[in-house]
Amino acid sequence: MADMTDNPKASPKSAIRRNLPLIAIATVAIIGAITLRDYLSFDALRDNREALIAFRDDNLLLTVAGFLLAYVVIVAFSLPGALIATLTGGFLFGTIGGGLLSVAAATAGATVIFLAARYGLGERLKARMDASQGTVRKIRDGLEENQWSMLFFLRLVPVVPFFVANLVPAFLAVPLSRYVISTFLGIIPGSMVYASVGAGLGTVFARGESPDLGVIFEPHILLPILGLSALSLLPVLIKAVTGKKGL
């Protein structure tokens, strides 16, 4: 008996079912961008800081669980406020604690998008990307020939938006374990930097100032990250010189 997905009459319904996760993500993202921008902001954190600290002191485990859940939802549904969430993590749990919680939650949220994209549009968009040119074609070729290197590079240096960097590997059949590991490790440097900014927000609030979110571009922070990025591309350079295929 032929597969129902081969039946042209059945394929539209099948396509809708496959795309439901992505449709839900896109719908929530649009609604969230319109309705939540004022709530997931630096001003909201500043105005509610005392209540957040009091709640954390009385309910530490619940605060950790709530923070993780909120961060996963923000990333999974591409809602505004991921940076504010990282700052909040540092503010509530310190640089190391807040940074690691942010990395774990961001990885989980990114994995949700990855799986939704692979389940819904993976094969069809992969075929389109195979026929594409320009930047998309270069990213595709780079990922296929040197998956570890390119995945780390995309995370360390956000040359494309985080949401896009979540989708592209899904369309190129990158193994889930490889995607999760490279995402987790690749976003650690940036997350730790912003968590450290969040950890110092108490002093910033006391002075009535705003945090310096451009700190990541300061030489003593940016140069090590660029160094890691260059290191991640080393296998690509070796391949270019020797002609050997990367992993």
Image (cartoon, rainbow, N blue to C red):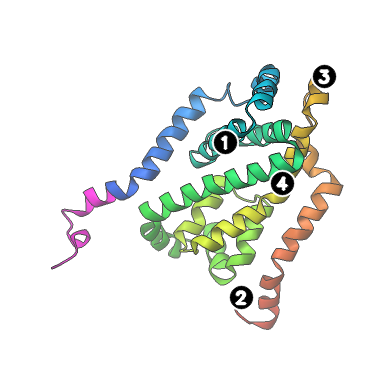
Q: Residues within 10 Å of mark 3 (few under 14, many from 20)?
A: few
**Three-letter code for the amino acid on which mark 4 is drawn:** Gly
* Lower position in the chain sequence, tag 1 or tag 4: 1
Quadrant housing the N terminus: bottom left
Question: Where's residue 244, x and y in %?
Answer: 63, 82
* Lower position in the chain sequence, tag 4 or tag 3: 4
State how far apart marks 3 and 1 are (Cα).
Answer: 28 Å
Specify the quadrant of the image occupied by residue 152.
Answer: bottom right
Residue located 51% across and 29% down the image: 33
In the image, residue 42 sits, relative to residue 86, either above or below, namely above
Mark 2 = which residue?
246
Q: Secondary structure at mark 3?
A: helix
Mark 4 = which residue?
190
State how far apart marks 4 and 3 are (Cα).
Answer: 25 Å
Farthest residue, direction left: 1
Q: Secondary structure at mark 1?
A: helix
The label shown at residue 206 is: 3
* Lower position in the chain sequence, tag 3 or tag 2: 3
State how far apart marks 4 and 2 are (Cα).
Answer: 26 Å
